[in-house]
Image (spheres, helix red, strand yellow):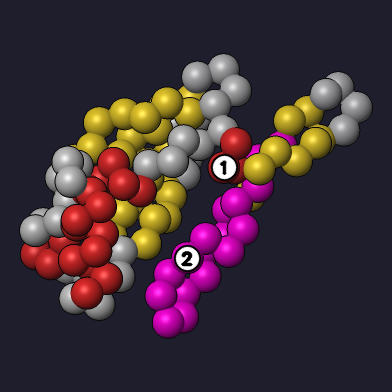
C-alpha cells in the first residue's frame, strides 16, 4: 500500500495505491474499488441539504485516510480544512473506522476526534 497526501490550497489524496500479490508480481488495485463511498455518511440524514449549505457557505470538507502502523484497518478522516466547531453543525463525526474484510473494507462507526 502506498498513500500520499498533497496540500495546497486544500489537502487531498494525491496517491493511494493498493496491490495484490499473485505469487509472481504485485498487481495494482484502485482504492475506490475496495473502500466504500463514505463522504456523505459523515453528514448523516438529509446529506443533500447539508452539502448544499456547505457549498453556499464556502466551507470545504475533504476526505483523507489514516493508515495503521499495525494491522489492516484504516480510518477515514472527514473535514480536515476547518475547525470541529464549524463542522459540528453539519456532521455526525469526523472519523470513521474502516475494517478490513477479506479483500475490501467495511464501514464502521463514525465519531469525533
Residue farthest toward the top in the current orientation of the protein: 102
- In x, y percent, where is residue 45? 17, 41
Q: Nearer the viewer, residue 60 or 53?
A: 53
Quarter containing the N terminus: top right
Q: Nearer the viewer, residue 37 or 107?
A: 37
Asked if the residue at tag 2 contacts the one at tag 1, i.e. Cβ–Cβ closer than 8 Å, the answer is: no
Is residue 94 visible in the rendered structure shown here? no
| Residue 23 counted in the magenta span | no
Where residue 12 is drawn, which disc sits there?
2
Q: Nearer the viewer, residue 56 or 24?
A: 56
| For residue 71, above or below residue 91 | above
Say whether residue 30 is left or right of residue 40. Answer: right
| Residue 10 counted in the magenta span | yes
Disc 1 crowd rating (10 Å Cα; few below 14, some 14-19, many 20+) is few
Q: Which residue is mark 1?
A: 32
Disc 2 crowd rating (10 Å Cα; few below 14, some 14-19, many 20+) is some
Which stretch is magenta?
3-19
Residue farthest toward the bottom in the current orientation of the protein: 9
| For residue 37, above or below residue 73 | below
Decide whether the magenta segment is chiefly helix, strand or loop.
Answer: strand
Q: Earlier in the sequence, mark 1 or mark 2?
A: 2
Secondary structure at badge 2 equals: strand
| For residue 58, above or below residue 13 | below
Secondary structure at badge 1 equals: helix
- In x, y percent, where is residue 13? 52, 60
Is residue 50 visible in the rendered structure shown here? yes
| For residue 61, above or below residue 9 | above
The mark lying in front, picked from 1 and 2, is 1
Q: Nearer the viewer, residue 27 or 61?
A: 61
Amino acid at each position: 500500500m502506498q498513500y500520499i497526501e498533497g496540500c495546497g490550497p486544500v489537502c487531498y489524496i494525491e496517491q493511494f495505491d493498493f496491490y495484490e500479490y499473485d505469487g509472481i508480481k504485485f498487481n495494482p488495485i484502485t482504492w475506490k474499488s475496495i473502500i466504500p463511498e463514505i463522504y456523505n455518511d459523515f453528514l448523516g440524514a438529509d446529506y443533500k441539504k447539508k452539502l448544499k449549505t456547505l457549498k453556499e457557505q464556502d466551507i470545504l470538507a475533504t476526505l483523507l485516510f489514516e493508515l495503521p502502523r499495525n494491522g489492516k484497518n484504516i480510518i477515514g478522516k472527514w473535514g480536515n480544512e476547518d475547525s470541529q466547531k464549524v463542522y459540528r453543525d453539519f456532521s455526525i463525526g469526523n472519523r470513521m473506522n474502516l475494517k478490513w474484510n477479506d479483500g475490501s473494507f467495511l464501514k464502521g462507526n463514525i465519531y469525533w476526534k
